Image: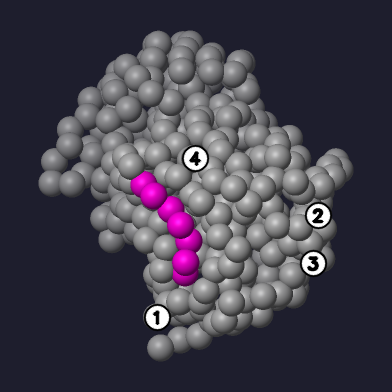
Amino acid sequence: MDKFLIQGGNVLKGAVRISGAKNAALPLLAATILAETPITITNVPNLKDVNTLVKLISGLGVTISYDNHDVVKADTSTLSNQFAPYELVKTMRASILVLGPLLARYGEAKVSLPGGCAIGSRPVDQHLKALEALGAHIEVDAGYVHAKVDGRLKGGEVIFDMVTVGGTENILMAAVLAEGVTTIRNAAREPEITDLANMLVKMGAKISGIDTDTLIVTGVERLSGCEYAVVADRIETGSYLAAAAMTGGCVRTTHTDPVLLESVLEKFEEMGAEVTRGDDWIELDMQGKRPKAVSFRTLPHPEFPTDMQAQIMAVNTIARGFSTISETIFENRFMHVPELSRMGANIEVEGNDATVTGVEKLSAAPVMATDLRASFSLVLAALAAEGETLVDRIYHIDRGYEKIEEKLQGLGAQIKRVSE
């Protein structure tokens, strides 16, 4: 199993190119199922999750190519079944996103209930209720969702009980081929949903209310292929900026968009960092200073994203002062706390709230990653710690960060991948 060996103490400086967003690429790949003619998606990150979904879609019979150089081409004319097996779905929650497109275009789908990061309950009941509102007949049996519709799905009103990114994506992809008008209320507003909506429109869908919490979809009979580029990864962007804040360095992220993570940039500025924005780049200069502690609460977009909680907590561990962090999205997303504590962090957790008292220095220790974003928080801690840290179970990080050691090495980090 691969691990990272990291020698702490280096100040990170330089520029890093940001990849396409995993959380945008996955629904875009699922949406290829809707296209009657070939479709090309560019700026696709080469990640384990992307490869898993490509394999799943290929298993449906779709002719799909992924050259590992950021381009995916798909032709659905060869699609031969609507079955997504447990063996593929179990490793990645986003696999459930093929349910809506398969049902909308082919009238039937059988998809295993998903797996993914162990960060608390993320039920798919909102997905299923939304599809039922459009006329789908759904049974859940032996770990599989079996959905059918007589003829086409029918437009209707969908009101989510809670903000759900995956649920919004699934019903949006289903609604574009439904008969009539569908109104989606309490829709998630993440940039990845905007990206999906924009690609669907380019394919011929009729969607209004993009970027708001109410999406109105007028169904069409068919969608065509197009060429579309995945939006920049805002979480990868924030993670590398956090590395600059953590080490007192200066890092410029390129091929990204400052608009996508304004709430995070505001927190970096509150830490005392100098943040400069361009049209497609962001630079964070800590000027060798120790950051100030910042408090925050995770909330749906455009507020502070849950996927940056672990990284900013890591920076807070060596910041001046104390901070409080409230996690309102997932109920079990502080699993990195015991590992950070092993390195000398002073963190107290009570329910969904954490109090972090900054220490001057962290110390190297063997640590273990528990989920995707927690993995990067441990890398950040190791970059700032005294000594050599071994980070285990880094397969989590490979699910969401492309070429991480190569990118960090380019900024001056001493990090290498080792196998045991």
Question: Quadrant location of the C terminus?
Answer: bottom left
Ranked by sequence position, the earlier of labels 1 and 3 is 1
Residues rendered magenta in the picture:
343-349
Looking at the rendered structure, the secondary structure element under dot 2 is strand
Q: Residues within 10 Å of mark 4 (few under 14, many from 20)?
A: some
Q: Which mark is residue 285?
A: 2
Three-letter code for the amino acid on which mark 2 is drawn: Asp
Looking at the rendered structure, the secondary structure element under dot 4 is strand
Q: Which mark is residue 13?
A: 3
- Is residue 220 shown to the viewer in this render? yes
Q: Residue at x 71, y 75 (%)?
A: 10
Real-space CA distance between mark 4 and mark 2, rounded to the nearest whole angstrom: 24 Å
| Left or right: 236 as drawn, with respect to 179 | right
Nearer to us of marks 4 and 2 is: 4
Looking at the rendered structure, the secondary structure element under dot 3 is strand
Nearer to us of marks 1 and 4 is: 4
Magenta stretch contains residue 344:
yes
Q: Position of residue 115 (x, y in %)?
A: 31, 52
105 shown above or below 89: above
Ranked by sequence position, the earlier of labels 3 and 2 is 3
